[in-house]
Amino acid sequence: MARIIILLLSALNNRRMAQYEAALAGAHTSHWRGTTAPRQAAGVSYRLNGVADPAAPTADPRVAGRPDGRDVSGRDGWTEVWPARQFPPPPPPRRRWIPRWVKWSVFLVLVGLVFRRAVAALVLAALSAGLHLVGLNLHLPDVRFAWPWQTASAAPATSNVDLGPWVLQKIEGISKPALGTENFNFVFTHKVSKNIGPWPCWYSSTFYAVGHASATVNLNPGPSWWATATGHYQLQVLSRPSAGHSGRVSIVMTLPPPQLPQNVHDVTIDNTLSKPLSTAHSWTYPGLGCGTLIRPQFSPSAVYAAAQQQAFYRVNHVSSVTRPLISAAESQATQIIRNSFVQPTVNALGYTLESFTLRWAS
């Protein structure tokens, strides 16, 4: 909008400069239609020096208007004067493609749009005064006078908006859960024993493994969870927006606790970082057929499955693994709800988030 206003002002300024230059040039040049002196007819002779003297030398022919220098003496001492040279008239003035009233109308409309709040306040004040003079008491909209740079920085007036349902509607639109992901390492021993009759047959290997697991937080448990009687969602308006100042709100929410992996396949093992540390076996390995029975139990897929079982047990029962998972899930859930849903909603309605507390149901 600022570019359009600058373009219109530059066009008006250029036209004013053109009118000023025309005034300096003079009226006879700005509206010239040819020479202003009366033009003489061709072939008319005039006596220049009284009595005719055919033998007298004539004046320079170029003074009389003949450019070729030939003798221009006429009969009886008269000098023949040729018509003055005529120059072509200047081109007609440029046609106006856009009438002046259209330009001014567009300019006034743009100015009215930029200063619409101030214009509306003045119009309503004048209308209210006029109605008061004639004895009419009508309820007109309340529009306060303000300049554009004041309304741009001021918070919108939303004192009549019920803020709680708006924020809750945004929260109920969350479709993805929060994931608290953590990596952990552990050492385990995989041992297989299959005796062949009286002969012992066993093999044992100790592995270093790196596991990867995630705890899940359901950010939208459903409408019944957010019912008023449950107290899981509490929004308190500390102050309303007024006089260009934002309002303040405080929100307290309660969510179900993070859920740990429920299936062994929810835990993965990093094969690139995992490695065997030590091995041990019976004196019969690999002879006497012991190797044929033991080797399939130590294939990569079998060892990976054993490591998954060990990791799944740790993420559900070992506190050193469980606590970081739960803490990461809670932190991510708080950031998602606050930064992506609650904060933008209250800011759009003219409020600032004074405090946000996310609690976890027992």
Image: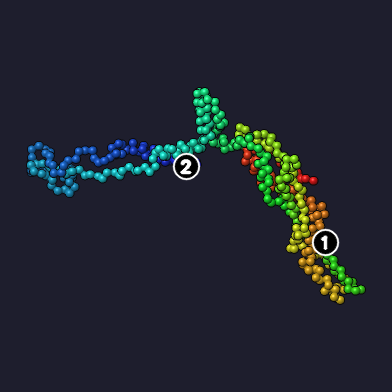
Using the image as rendered, state which of residue 38 and residue 128 is in the foreground.
128
Q: Residue at x 56, y 29 (%)?
A: 139
Three-letter amino acid code at disc 2?
Answer: Ile
Q: Is residue 41 visible?
A: yes
The image shows residue 154 at horizontal and vertical percentages of: 59, 36
Q: Residue at x 39, y 42 (%)?
A: 98
Disc number for residue 320 = none
Count of marks placed on residues = 2
Dot 2: within a 10 Å radius of its alpha carbon, few (fewer than 14), some, or many (20 or more) residues?
Answer: few
Mark 1: which secondary structure?
Answer: strand
Label 1 sits on residue: 188
Residue 210's place in the image compared with 53, above or below, is below
Disc number for residue 4 = 2
Q: Is residue 357 visible?
A: no
Marks 1 and 2 in Cβ contact (< 8 Å): no
Q: Residue at x 33, y 36 (%)?
A: 23
Q: Residue at x 9, y 41 (%)?
A: 77
* Distance from Cα at disc 1 to Cα at disc 2: 74 Å
Using the image as rendered, state which of residue 118 and residue 13 is in the foreground.
118
Q: Is residue 288 left or right of residue 11?
A: right
